[in-house]
């Protein structure tokens, strides 16, 4: 399977819908808003992430405004995103660290981002890619699962997937890879019973681990 051909074919199939909230809104979000939206997106649907993010940012869109909110009020604002208690704690904690250590600015390096408790590698890479335009590959469950299903790589962890994809995926596709594969994974290449009959790359897919499809 040729990875460049795969990317181009999926782009044609998914068309203008290939952007997710985080990279679609990158041009109007500040790096801080991109970071917080990423935290809100964990285990949440894309549409809900967008709705809750806008609701929160209309009230508080800077670290200073976030820390001034009570824990309970913040929980109420982001309730619909799910896991709201943990997310609220993480958002307030990160905001305080940014104020105390980074002059309220979100770092633009992986090293500094990963020093902040609550920011993992995927979140750091999303911020670097969408907020700062850096050449990185944000890898979530879809971006890890699908390349393995297709037979492009054989890895066990998202970290391994990132390293292997960096070897075979041309840099010109890095910026759009996450958004493209997240939408592909949510709409067609589902974790269970993927819609293979609707897939534009089904002829080349090795369907590794697929027991039942539609």
Image (spheres, rainbow, N blue to C red):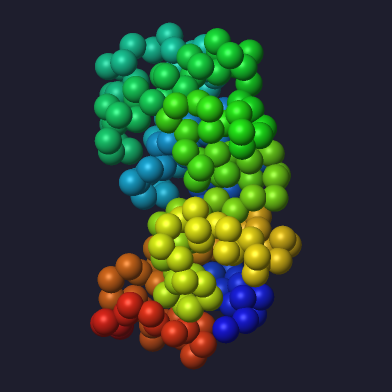
The percent position of residue 167, horizontal first and vertical second, equals 65, 65
Asked if one can make out residue 185 in the rendered structure from this viewpoint, the answer is: no
Q: State which quarter of the image contains the N terminus.
A: bottom right
Q: Foreground: 78 or 137? A: 137
* Residue reaching furthest to the right: 172
The image quarter in which residue 191 lies: bottom left
Relative to residue 166, is residue 52 depicted above or below? above
Image vertical order of residue 112 relative to residue 135, above or below: above
Q: In front: 22, or 103? A: 103
Asked if one can make out residue 21 in the rendered structure from this viewpoint, the answer is yes
Query: For residue 11, which quarter of the picture?
Result: bottom right
Q: Where does the image place residue 86, in percent across and percent down from the top left?
A: 30, 29
Instruction: Give whichever of 104, 200 is nearer the camera.
Output: 104
Q: Nearer the viewer, residue 39 or 29?
A: 39
* Residue at position x 67%, y 32% in the image: 108
Residue 79 image point, x, y percent: 28, 31
Q: Residue at x 56, y 44 (%)?
A: 126
- Left or right for 120, reference 26: left
Image quarter in which the C terminus is found:
bottom left
Is residue 185 positioned above or below 140 on the image? below
Residue 49, quarter of the rendered image: top left
Residue 85 in the figure: left or right of residue 1: left
Q: Position of residue 57 (x, y in %)?
A: 49, 26
- Residue at the image position 44 percent from the left and 12 percent from the top: 67
Q: Residue furthest bottom?
A: 203
Count all numbered tags in the image, as a single digit: 0
**21 sits left or right of 52 in the view:** right
Q: Is residue 177 above or below residue 38?
A: below
Residue at image coords 43%, 30%? 118
């Amino acid at each position: 399977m040729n990875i460049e051909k795969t990317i181009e074919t999926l782009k044609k199939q998914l068309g203008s819908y290939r952007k997710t909230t985080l990279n679609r809104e990158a041009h109007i979000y500040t790096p801080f808003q991109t970071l917080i939206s990423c935290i809100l997106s964990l285990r949440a649907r894309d549409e809900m992430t967008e709705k809750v993010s806008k609701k929160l940012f209309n009230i508080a869109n800077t670290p200073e405004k976030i820390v001034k909110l009570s824990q309970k009020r913040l929980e109420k604002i982001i309730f619909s995103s799910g896991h709201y208690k943990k997310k609220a704690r993480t958002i307030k904690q990160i905001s305080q660290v940014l104020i105390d250590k980074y002059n309220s600015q979100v770092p633009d390096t992986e090293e500094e981002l990963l020093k902040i408790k609550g920011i993992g590698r995927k979140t750091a890479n999303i911020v670097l890619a969408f907020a700062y335009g850096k050449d990185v590959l944000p890898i979530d469950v879809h971006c890890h699962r699908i390349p393995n299903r297709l037979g492009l790589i054989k890895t066990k962890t998202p970290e391994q997937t990132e390293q292997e994809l960096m070897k075979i995926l041309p840099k010109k596709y890095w910026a759009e890879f996450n958004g493209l594969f997240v939408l592909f994974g949510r709409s067609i290449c589902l974790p269970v019973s993927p819609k293979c009959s609707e897939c534009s790359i089904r002829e080349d897919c090795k369907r590794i681990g697929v027991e039942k499809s539609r």
